[in-house]
Amino acid sequence: MRLLPLIGTVLVVSLCSFKAHAIVTYLNCPTLQPLPVTNFMPGAMLPIENVISAYDVGMNSVIKTAIDMAGQKQVQAINDDFTNIMKAMIKISRSQQQQELELDRQMADMKRSYTSKLAAEKERTKNMLFPSDPAMTPIEGGASPIVSVDSPTYKFVKQLCSAAKMQQLSSGKQVRDKALSSMNRRNQKIMSNMQAVSNVNVAAKRNLDMHYDLFCSKEDADEGSCETSSIAPNADISAFNFLFPVGYVQENDELSEEYRTIYTYSAVESLAAYQYIKNLSGVMYVTPPVTGDYTSDSKMLFVATYKQMVSALSISTDVMLSIAQSREPVNSEGVALSTMDALNYQLHQSNMPHVKRIVRSASPSGKMLELQKQMAISNKLKHMLLKQKEQMRTLEAVELSVDMTLISLDR
């Protein structure tokens, strides 16, 4: 509002100093008195507009300058804050990178240490049966660890030792030599008795009397053929008793709860098996040739046929004695076992659940030992099967030769 008198004064001076561009013309302004203004033309408004424009420009410039300065200060403050933040972030990033590098270095050291220890542990436990078993862990100071009977190592080694003993019983040289000597002795005895027959009826009666004396059945006793029945009735004429003897039942029950023998003769059953072979193939109801028959031309065919029959029965007897010998006891202590039962015991033990669990938890070396044991059992079974097939072919050859001789005699 204070600007209005000032503006009026400036306006009057201007009107008086210059020619007015209005409708009413004024001559002059000697007294500098303000003249009456009757009308404003566009040109008269220009000074006022200039003043207003000058004011607006001035004020806008001041305000703009103030705003620019305030904006610059804010931008500078933001830039400073951003710079500080970036510095802090870079510092944190560098610290984090250093920590990560340190962690990577420590992790690499730990990995190398673990790999080295693992390789050393693998090398140490390479030949161990059960590396996790305390019995396999060495004690500081070099002392030997105490092996518990419940540890898997003890049980595994015990099974291997038992299998080795059974293999020795079933296929050891001493056992084989003893079996061969017994077979030869019995075969020679049977052949000698067979050829020493002077009277067929006497020989038949002698065999019948031995049956009633040693192997009389309850039916025979009831008929009066013998006084009392035997503990092994009809064992000398039964193929089942010959192949599947009862064995030492009482001793077996006392010494072993896990296994019962099914292929081992008792003393009575061993004698019964020998008599069974004699009754089956060791008796030839033909009077042997006398000394003069060997030089007589008329008896030549008879002598040759007789010798062939003796040879055929000798081979058959040898096969039967081989079957019986595999069921004869081969040990002198513990449960009486034959070679057949020794082999069957190993198969029985291999199928036991606790044995399978131990083998599954064993190391590769332990599994390899178990595999070798099973391969030894398999080879023994294969050998027995091959031997049985060979004996069958031998018997077939003997039967064929006898049949051809009988055919030639019929002609």
Image (spheres, rainbow, N blue to C red):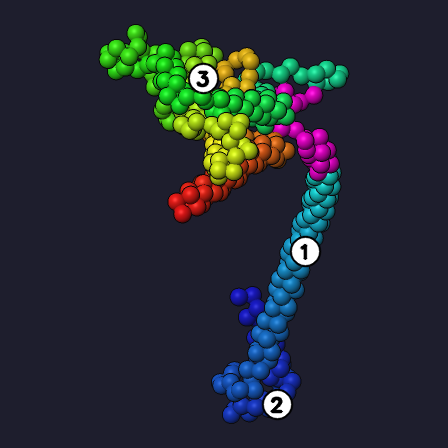
Which range is magenta? 114-138
> Does label 1 or label 3 sit earlier along the sequence?
1
Q: Secondary structure at mark 2?
A: loop
Q: Secondary structure at mark 1?
A: helix
Amino acid bearing label 2: Lys
**Image coords of residue 92 (percent x, y):** 69, 45
Q: Is residue 79 visible?
A: yes
- According to the picture, the residue beneath numbered tag 1 turns out to be 79
- According to the picture, the residue beneath numbered tag 2 turns out to be 19
**Image coords of residue 310 (percent x, y):** 49, 32
Q: Is residue 77 left or right of residue 300?
A: right
Front residue of 229 and 81 = 229
Q: Secondary structure at mark 3?
A: helix
Q: Nearer the viewer, mark 1 or mark 3?
A: 3
Front residue of 357 and 260 = 260
Q: Nearer the viewer, mark 1 or mark 2?
A: 1
Q: Residue furthest top?
A: 227
- According to the picture, the residue beneath numbered tag 3 turns out to be 271
Q: Residues within 10 Å of mark 1 (few under 14, many from 20)?
A: few
**What is the tally of numbered marks visible in this picture?**
3
Amino acid bearing label 1: Asn
